[in-house]
Structures are given as structure tokens and as C-alpha cells.
């Protein structure tokens, strides 16, 4: 199970039919190198999402603990949403984003790092529950590699849109201003909803389309009642980013090997952005 398979048949990583481990192309869906050089069984043992959900939850948990450690005696212990919240300097150290940080201090990479930070115990628990629910579903519709790309695109687009709006556009009643620092995986999560919404159109699934519509509407309603806590612009940008990424990737076409490579690059850039935030802040 944990070794490379060099003979026999394996299950195509895109469509699930049996193919030869050394086949150049899947006869059913057309995917090139369906056996992934013999590592397909090992990768499938990680689950439909190739272990992405545990990676996200584990990384977010580690970064959350590190921000608490960096907070020292300044950990927030008050309020429902801020309970066990890292200090603002700790969040800035690990890569929180915002208009002033991106344009004033040139910390452009924080639109990657901010999605791995959380402002309290309830914040990280709710976001990780949403990732646990949505990411495997999107992986089943698009493939695990494209799911990672969509997740990352949602976060980057969400924070980029929030930063742009906060710097150049006026505040909108009920939606807020987009100014100030912002963090959290919710922009990535709404990106996954954008992908489900596009799949509903592309694949003709009214159930997927209805689920995505009701979910994003609920997120926006929560944002209206929790202004100052929830970043509505990041959510809107994330939904749009996920939708556009899904449209470019086309769920009705088989996932390719280069999608997995791009997904690994997305994860590497995300981790590198956190490291860059810490290094540039300390040195």
C-alpha cells in the first residue's frame, strides 16, 4: 500500500476505471499517465481529496497555535468570536493582509498567507468544519488537484478584492468598508462554493446550483449582521475567484497530471508566503 506499484492494474485517478499501471493514456477518459508512475494506489489511500483536507486542517491548526505562542500574554479571552484569539501583532507577523499592508508596506504575498490564519477558537473550528464538508465534494466533482487550485484561487481572489475595495472604493452600508486587517479560510471556502455553483450550470445539476446559491446567501446575511467581524468583500471575491477558476478548469473534462503539479505549487506558495511574512517581519 505504501510502495510504488510497478506491475498489474491500478484505478485511474480521474475516472476510476481499471488501467494498466504503465499505460500512457486511460482508454475511458483520456487522462495521460493515469497510474501516476505507479504511485496512484498510494495517493488514493489518502482519500478522494489526496489528503488535502487533513493538510489544510493540520496546517491551520499549527499556524493558529504559533500565533497564540507569539501573542504571549496578549491572547484575547473575551467574547464569543474573539475567545482565544491571537494578538494583532502576532497575526501581522504570520501574514495577515489588508490595504495598508499590501500597498503601504509592500507585503503583497499576504493575500496568500492570510487564509491560513484565524482570529479565535470559534473562527478556526467553523472554518475547518466547512472545509471538511466542501473540499471532498469539490474534489469528487473536479478532481483533487483542481480542487486545490480552486481553493487557493478563491483565497487569493477574495483577499485581493477586499484589499482593492478597501483602498479605492467607498464603504457600502451593510457590507462594510474592506479596510483594516483581514484573515481566515472563509474566502477559500466561498471559492469552493463558486466551483459548486459553476458545476451546477456546466453539468446541469439544479441541486448543486441551489445548494451553492443558498449557502453564499447565508454567508452574506451573516456578514450583514456581523459587520466588523466578517469580511463580506473577501467572501464575494472568493466566490467569484472560485467560479472563474472552475470555469477555466472545466469539470466535464478529465483532470490532468499537470493539474496536480499546479496544486502542489499552490500549496508551496501558500506555505512560502507564511515563511516570507515571518522572515521579513523579524529581519
Image: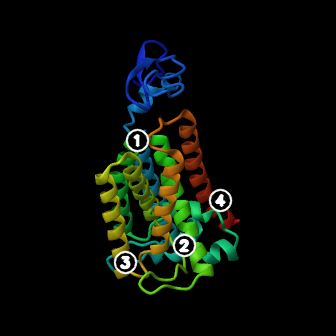
Q: Write down the residue under mark 2.
A: 162
Q: Dots 2 and 3: beta carbons under 8 Å?
A: no
How far separated are the C-alphas under marks 1 and 2? 29 Å
| Mark sitting on residue 49 | 1
What SS does tag 4 mark? helix
Of the two numbered discs 3 and 1 on the same chain, state the one appearing first in sequence: 1
Q: Write down the residue under mark 4.
A: 276
Q: Say few, some or many: other residues with alpha carbon within 10 Å of mark 3 (under 14 / 14 to 19 / 20 or more).
A: few
Closer mark to the observer between disc 2 and disc 4: 2
How far separated are the C-alphas under marks 2 and 4? 21 Å
Q: Which residue is at the far left?
A: 207
What SS does tag 2 mark? helix
Closer mark to the observer between disc 4 and disc 1: 1
Q: Quadrant of the C terminus?
A: bottom right
Q: Which residue is at the far top?
A: 7
Of the two numbered discs 2 and 3 on the same chain, state the one appearing first in sequence: 3
Tell me which corner region of the image, top left, top right, bottom left or bottom right, holds residue 278: bottom right
Residue 276 in the image: x percent, y percent?
Answer: 65, 59
Q: Write down the residue under mark 3.
A: 77
Q: Is residue 113 visible?
A: no
Q: Say few, some or many: other residues with alpha carbon within 10 Å of mark 1 (under 14 / 14 to 19 / 20 or more).
A: many
Tell me which corner region of the image, top left, top right, bottom left or bottom right, holds residue 119: bottom left
Of the two numbered discs 2 and 4 on the same chain, state the one appearing first in sequence: 2
How far separated are the C-alphas under marks 4 and 1? 27 Å
Up-down relation of residue 108 to residue 35 (above or below): below
Of the two numbered discs 3 and 4 on the same chain, state the one appearing first in sequence: 3
How far separated are the C-alphas under marks 3 and 1? 35 Å
How far separated are the C-alphas under marks 3 and 4? 29 Å
Residue 170 in the image: x percent, y percent?
Answer: 56, 85
What SS does tag 3 mark? loop
Closer mark to the observer between disc 2 and disc 3: 2
Closer mark to the observer between disc 1 and disc 2: 2
Amino acid at each position: 500500500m505504501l510502495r510504488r506499484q510497478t506491475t498489474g492494474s491500478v484505478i485511474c485517478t480521474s475516472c476510476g476505471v481499471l488501467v494498466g499501471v504503465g499505460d500512457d493514456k486511460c482508454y475511458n477518459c483520456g487522462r495521460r499517465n493515469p497510474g501516476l508512475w505507479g504511485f496512484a494506489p498510494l495517493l488514493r489511500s489518502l482519500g478522494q481529496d489526496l489528503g488535502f483536507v487533513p493538510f489544510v486542517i493540520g496546517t491551520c491548526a499549527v499556524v493558529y497555535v504559533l500565533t497564540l505562542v507569539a501573542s504571549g500574554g496578549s491572547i484575547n479571552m473575551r467574547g464569543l468570536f474573539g475567545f482565544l484569539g491571537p494578538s494583532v501583532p502576532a497575526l501581522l507577523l504570520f501574514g495577515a493582509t489588508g490595504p495598508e499592508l499590501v500597498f503601504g508596506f509592500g507585503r503583497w504575498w499576504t493575500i496568500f498567507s492570510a487564509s491560513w490564519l484565524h482570529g479565535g477558537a470559534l473562527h478556526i473550528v467553523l472554518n475547518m468544519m466547512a472545509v471538511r464538508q466542501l473540499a471532498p465534494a469539490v474534489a469528487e466533482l473536479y478532481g483533487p488537484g483542481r480542487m486545490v487550485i480552486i481553493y487557493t484561487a478563491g483565497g487569493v481572489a477574495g483577499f485581493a478584492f477586499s484589499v482593492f475595495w478597501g483602498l479605492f472604493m467607498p464603504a457600502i452600508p451593510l457590507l462594510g468598508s474592506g479596510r483594516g486587517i483581514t484573515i481566515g479560510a472563509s474566502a477559500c471556502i466561498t471559492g469552493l462554493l463558486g466551483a459548486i455553483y459553476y458545476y451546477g450550470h456546466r453539468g446541469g445539476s439544479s441541486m448543486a446550483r441551489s445548494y451553492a446559491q443558498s449557502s453564499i446567501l447565508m454567508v452574506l446575511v451573516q456578514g450583514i449582521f456581523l459587520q466588523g467581524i466578517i469580511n463580506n468583500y473577501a467572501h464575494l471575491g472568493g466566490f467569484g475567484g472560485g467560479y472563474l477558476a472552475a470555469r477555466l478548469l472545466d469539470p466535464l473534462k478529465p483532470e490532468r497530471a499537470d493539474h496536480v503539479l499546479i496544486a502542489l505549487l499552490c500549496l508551496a506558495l501558500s506555505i512560502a508566503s507564511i515563511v516570507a511574512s515571518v522572515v521579513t517581519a523579524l529581519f
